[in-house]
Amino acid sequence: MLIAAKQYGMSHPIVLTYSKEIDLIHNYLLEMESKRSFPKT
C-alpha cells in the first residue's frame, strides 16, 4: 500500500482498496483477540 500511495497518491482507488482490505483484516484480528481474551460465558 505504501508503495502504491507513493506512486499514485493517497486518494488513488487502488490505495483506497488496499486501505479497506487492511482495515477489514485489522478489525477481524481485533475481534479474534477480544474473543480469546474475554470468552463469552
Image (spheres, helix red, strand yellow):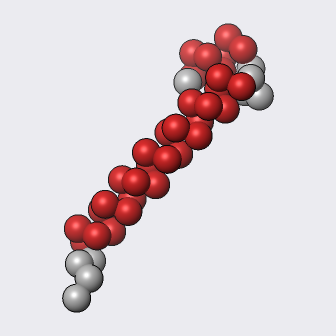
**Residue depicted at 57% across the width and 15% down the height:** 3
Report the number of numbered marks: 0
**Residue depicted at 62% across the width and 31% down the height:** 17
Residue 23 place in picture, x, y as percent: 53, 45
Q: Quadrant of residue 2?
A: top right
Residue sitting farthest toward the bottom: 41
User: Image check: 3 left or right of 33?
Assistant: right
**Residue depicted at 59% across the width and 36% down the height:** 19
The quadrant of the picture occupied by the N terminus is top right
**Residue depicted at 74% across the width and 23% down the height:** 12
Q: Quadrant of residue 5?
A: top right
Residue 35 place in picture, x, y as percent: 28, 70
The quadrant of the picture occupied by the C terminus is bottom left
Judge whether 34 appears above or below 13 on screen.
below
Judge whether 1 appears above or below 28 on screen.
above
Q: Quadrant of residue 38?
A: bottom left
